[in-house]
Amino acid sequence: MPQFPLLGSEDSPLPTYHGAVKLKMKMWLLGLVFCLAFGTLHSETSRGKWTPLDPETNMNVSEIISYWGFPSEEHFVETEDGYILCLHRIPHGRKNHSDKGPKAVVFLQHGLLADASDWVTNLPNSSLGFILADAGFDVWMGNSRGNTWSRKHKTLSVDQDEFWAFSYDEMANYDLPASINFILNKTGQDQAYYVGHSQGTTIGFIAFSRIPELARKIKMFFALAPVTSLEFATSPLTRLGQFPYFLIKDLFGVKAFLPQNEFMKWLSLHFCSHVVLKELCGNAFFVLCGFNERNLNMTRVAVYVAHNPAGTSVQNMIHWSQTFKLQKFQAFDWGSSAKNYLHYNQSYPPTYNVKDMQVPTAVWSGGRDWLADTKDISVLLTQITNLVYHECLPEWEHLDFIWGLDAPWRLYNKMINLMRKGINESQMEKFTIKSMIKPC
């Protein structure tokens, strides 16, 4: 009887390669864990103590908003392709609830693997969602399909592979138009201010450059740590782009990627609340996004971990790996000319052209950002047709824009001033102030 080589044996080179690459991937993941643990050695903190548990650790987004005395609303919107998204709203602040008349609308869109909690998990005086509400704005916070708050569909179940067949393409082409149109219809406003962080900026650049009627509904685009290229990014997350797509699917499946679950809740309650171990949880964020330890409120780490990561699809992560590997800002590559033709009516993915976007845009970047590198952003700035403001904060990493201790006075106050200037201007052309460019 003929002898066939065993899978993974020396006589079976393809499976051996497959096994070697998979082993390399696992070693990389183990190395990441080691880096997280090693980072605690440099933490300046006492040992063996437990910090009081913040009540928001066990709260959802709406409960957090109400806990701090703000009005909270939940709204659900159905996209053109059947996904049901949750929108969180803070219609007014704690002191201006008696103000009559319509308020300017601000829409906040979170980044990759996040949800609306990003804007309210710091204390009220340092969370952008609360600060904007107290400043007199009508604040809405989006949730991209597939995260904790947007896991429903008109006909599909989360147990079906088809539910998870999306990337940031669909978030831009379906989620964003549905959310913004719903908000404007609900409030009776003609325009809204759009604030995006990380992937929230990515889908903004796509949607506003490809859908002119949607772009006209945006009074100003505030891009925080924008990402349209990963050519110079150094985050370990970009390492996913070095592995074959079949291996990513082999490791993570084809459905959800890092969804919020009971294990993460357990970590936040029993691990990240410890005085020493919370430093380890904080290092998990720093290793992925860049280091600026002194600017993160370590007493809130358990709250952050209780809500993050909030999940996305494996296909979305593969799309990001394509962005890194191919160095192109383009639609998802379905892997063959035939499949691409089926989706795009052409054999290759269409390219996104930021220059086609006419929305007045203000950009903030960080000098220590490992995901939105300053070199990548320098290229992006040349493509923004109506750039009205740019400032680079040299010490900031990727998460300082949403959780930084100094964010209120270094960023949020400036954003509010630009919004108020926009409210008072009758013609947005007067808003072009390109002299206000502050590189690192």
Image (spheres, helix red, strand yellow):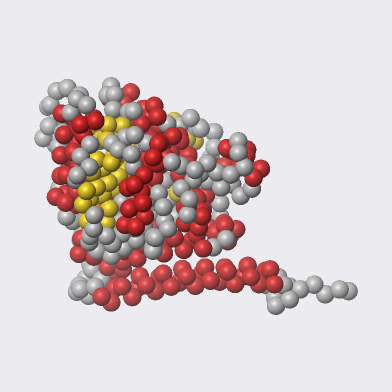
Residue positioned 27% across, 31% down in the render = 219
State whether residue 337 appears in this view.
Answer: yes
259 vs 439, left or right, is right
Number of marks in picture: 0
* Location of residue 435 (image quadrant): top left
Q: Is residue 435 above or below residue 405?
A: above
Query: Could you say which is closer to the camera, residue 51 or residue 78?
Result: 78
Nearer to me, 430 or 277: 430
- Give left or right: position of 29 versus 381: right
Screen quadrant of the C terminus: bottom left
Q: Position of residue 37 (x, y in %)?
A: 35, 73
Work out whether residue 296 can be spotted.
Answer: no
Where's residue 57, x and y in %? 28, 53
Query: Residue 424: x, y in percent?
Result: 15, 29
In depth, the one of 128 and 378 nearer the eye is: 378
Which quarter of the figure has residue 19?
bottom right
- Against 284, residue 253 (above or below) is above
At a point 64% along the width and 70% down the height, the residue shown is: 17
| Residue that protrudes farthest toward the right in the picture | 1
- Of the 4 image quadrants, the one containing the N terminus is bottom right
- Residue occupying the point 11% across, 35% down: 95
Q: Quadrant of residue 129?
A: top left
Give how far across and how far down residue 358 sits, in percent. Answer: 34, 34
The residue at the point 48 percent across, 50 percent down is: 328
Residue 95 appears left or right of 122: left
